[in-house]
Image: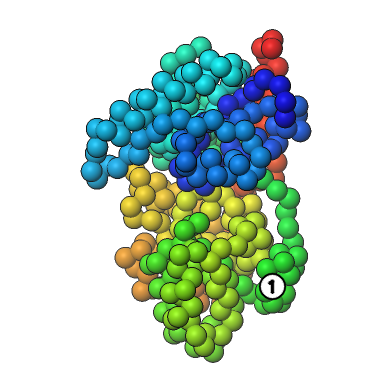
């Protein structure tokens, strides 16, 4: 879209932080509102924004390693903030929205310490570092999950579920596009966009123990892990390994999913009403995947299986698939966590905010 940028979306790092920004960018176009992403040069956000044809402005950024702090990374982050301030002075947006993750820090902090209104979108049930640092300078914090509310500023926080882009796809249509059997139960296995070796191994061992009774499984191994999985999967019935597949199609096709617990993954599952066996990544920052998974489990949308208890995967998997009533109830509970219209609600909130200021 031509014309001045009205909204800057500060994001970066992982897909869970980037995809909601891209969903909003796409939706804002329909409202005649121009936007651009601001993130780290060379990061995943630059690649994904290019694929989505969304304008991108890159700055320097540091990478936070909590186990081995490196002062040089903090200086890199500071340079990124100064560069982001120059970008904002040039673009003159009317609003900056930060989506969490260290990649969003330059743009969010630049807005927080300037005259540009700042909103923060906190997707996780336990607020991340950037949100905790800047929440008191934000005009508004939009939380994706009610579980985050006690740690966010009262009176300046709203709950709008994680915005998922795209139309609802039927199970039959999704399976047809993926080349999968149209009938019968299907389990999706997905360890994030890069896959998970631990999850891959546990799933293969479980499938071998099922024998001929193994459930049909769409196993997204991660591109780098596909060859290793194929070498171990010979002879497994109804096992469909892929390096990668479109997430919307994969969840639309599934009756049950075995996943990590990044909020993007969980929100996509909720959007399609898929119950979950969640294996939180133990090394996730602030253990946020465990907090996310616990919130989903408390809502009756699935169960949490810690990585050090993956030996019990086969039993949990079998019990869920065999209990049709429990599976159906978990699917309904999952769908309630991502009510239709979340993206539209978020966009409407932005439109209303911009309408209160003259251009």
Q: According to the image, what is the colour scheme of the structure?
A: rainbow
Estimate the x, y position of residue 117 in percent, counting from the top left: 54, 17
Between residues 312 and 101, which one lies in front from this camera angle? Answer: 101
Q: Is residue 285 visible?
A: yes
Give the camera-side residue of 132 and 225.
Answer: 225
Q: Quadrant of the C terminus?
A: top right
**Residue farthest top in this picture:** 358
Task: Residue at 50%, 52% (x, y): give it.
Answer: 296
Crowd band around label 1 with a 10 angstrom C-alpha radius: few (<14), some (14–19), many (20+): few
Q: Residue at x 48, y 26 (%)?
A: 107
Within the image, what quadrant is residue 74 found in?
top left
Image position of 211 with respect to 172: above or below: below
With 78 as the anchor, is 249 left or right in this view? right
Percent x, y of residue 342: 66, 40
Q: How many numbered circles does the render carry?
A: 1
Q: Residue at x 50, y 32 (%)?
A: 58
Q: Which residue is mark 1?
A: 179
Give the x, y percent position of residue 280.
40, 56
Q: Nearer the viewer, residue 62 or 323?
A: 62
- In the rendered image, which quarter is residue 183 located in? bottom right
Where is 295 relative to 57, above or below? below
**Disc 1, SS:** loop
């Amino acid at each position: 879209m031509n014309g001045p940028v009205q909204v800057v979306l500060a994001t970066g790092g992982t897909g869970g932080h980037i995809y909601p920004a891209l969903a909003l960018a796409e939706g804002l176009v329909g409202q005649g509102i121009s936007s651009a992403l601001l993130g780290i040069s060379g990061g995943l956000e630059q690649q994904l924004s290019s694929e989505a044809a969304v304008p991108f402005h890159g700055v320097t950024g540091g990478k936070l390693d909590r186990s081995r702090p490196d002062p040089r990374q903090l200086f890199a982050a500071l340079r990124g903030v100064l560069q982001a301030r120059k970008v904002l002075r040039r673009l003159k947006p009317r609003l900056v929205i930060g989506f969490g993750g260290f990649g969003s820090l330059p743009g969010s902090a630049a807005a927080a310490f300037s005259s540009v209104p700042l909103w923060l979108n906190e997707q996780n049930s336990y607020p991340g570092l950037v949100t905790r640092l800047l929440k008191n300078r934000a005009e508004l914090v939009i939380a994706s999950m009610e579980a985050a509310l006690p740690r966010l500023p009262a009176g300046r926080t709203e709950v709008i579920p994680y915005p998922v882009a795209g139309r609802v796809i039927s199970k039959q249509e999704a399976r047809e596009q993926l080349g999968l059997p149209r009938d019968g139960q299907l389990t999706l296995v997905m360890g994030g966009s890069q896959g998970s070796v631990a999850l891959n191994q546990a799933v293969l061992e479980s499938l071998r123990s099922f024998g001929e009774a193994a459930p049909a499984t769409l196993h997204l191994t991660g591109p780098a892990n596909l060859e290793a999985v194929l070498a171990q999967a010979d002879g497994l019935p109804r096992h469909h390994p892929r390096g990668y597949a479109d997430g919307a199609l994969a969840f639309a096709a599934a009756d049950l999913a075995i996943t990590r617990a990044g909020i993007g993954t969980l929100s996509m599952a909720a959007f399609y009403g898929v119950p979950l066996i969640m294996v939180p990544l133990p090394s996730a920052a602030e253990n946020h995947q465990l907090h996310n998974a616990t919130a989903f489990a408390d809502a009756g949308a699935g169960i949490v299986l810690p990585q050090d208890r993956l030996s019990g995967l086969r039993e949990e998997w079998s019990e869920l698939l065999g209990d049709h009533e429990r599976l159906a109830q978990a699917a309904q509970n999952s769908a309630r966590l991502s009510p239709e219209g979340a993206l539209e609600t978020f966009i409407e909130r932005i439109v209303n905010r911009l309408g209160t200021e003259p251009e």
